[in-house]
Amino acid sequence: MTSKRTAGLLAAALASLPLGCGGVGKVSGRVTYGGKPVPIGIIIFHPERGRAVAEEIEDGVYRAGKVPVGTVRVTVSTAFHRREYEAMKRLREEERKGVKRKPHPMKQPNTEGRERAEKEWPLLKAMIDIPEKYADPKTSGLSFTIHPGSQELDIEIPKE
């Protein structure tokens, strides 16, 4: 019994240690495409070792904590938000036309998701589509070195 508890505590302690051998950094900055702020999207830091860190971009700004120290490849994607925009646009058009959707008998209405989407609507309408190559760590061409502590890292993606 004691050895199982000790093993569990040891596993929990190891899981709480920072990833990588040099600790973590807090990274914040702006993301632009063709010189314009990216209104909404996702930025992901892919370290050589350890877990990737994903954060939202809003109004061209992001903040990421616990990014493993060392070389990271960075990806930026707006594909998820494009799909979200298209779904919201379709829903709004249906509502404008008076189309009523029947609720699914086994599901509760997702009012929280709807509220979040309504809040994001202005950003979704203004979104910029980032080319898909920037969503793949092998093709993004965005590579940076993360240091311990806080740092600012602006990501400038050239317009193609």
Image: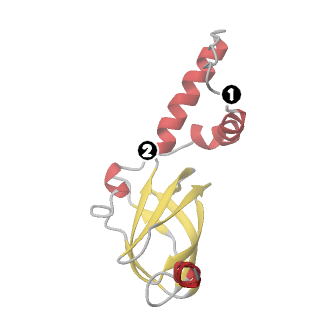
Q: Which mark is residue 22?
A: none
Q: Which residue is found at the position 47% from the left and 44% from the top? A: 80
Q: Position of residue 106 (x, y in %)?
A: 61, 23
Residue 151 shows up from this direction:
no
| Residue that numbered label 1 is attached to | 109
Left or right of residue 145: residue 119: right
Q: Which residue is mark 2?
A: 79
Which residue is rendered at x = 48% and y = 81% of the image? 19
Quadrant occupied by the N terminus: bottom right
Q: Quadrant of residue 45?
A: bottom left
Q: Estimate the spatial distance between the alpha carbons at disc 2 and disc 1, rounded to whole Å.
A: 25 Å
Of the pair 105 and 153, the residue shown nearer to us: 105
- Comparing labels 2 and 1, the label whose residue is closer to the camera: 1
Q: Amino acid at mark 2?
A: Ala
**Position of residue 139 measured from the top left corner of the image (x, y, whole percent):** 27, 61
Q: Image height check: is 80 above or below 24?
A: above
Q: Is residue 109 left or right of residue 53?
A: right
Classed neighbour count for the residue bearing mark 1: other residues with Cα under 10 Å, few (<14), some (14–19), many (≥20) = few
User: In the rendered view, would you say 25 is above or below 101?
Assistant: below
Residue 86 screen position, x and y as percent: 50, 30
| Residue at the limit of the structure toward the bottom, as seen here | 22
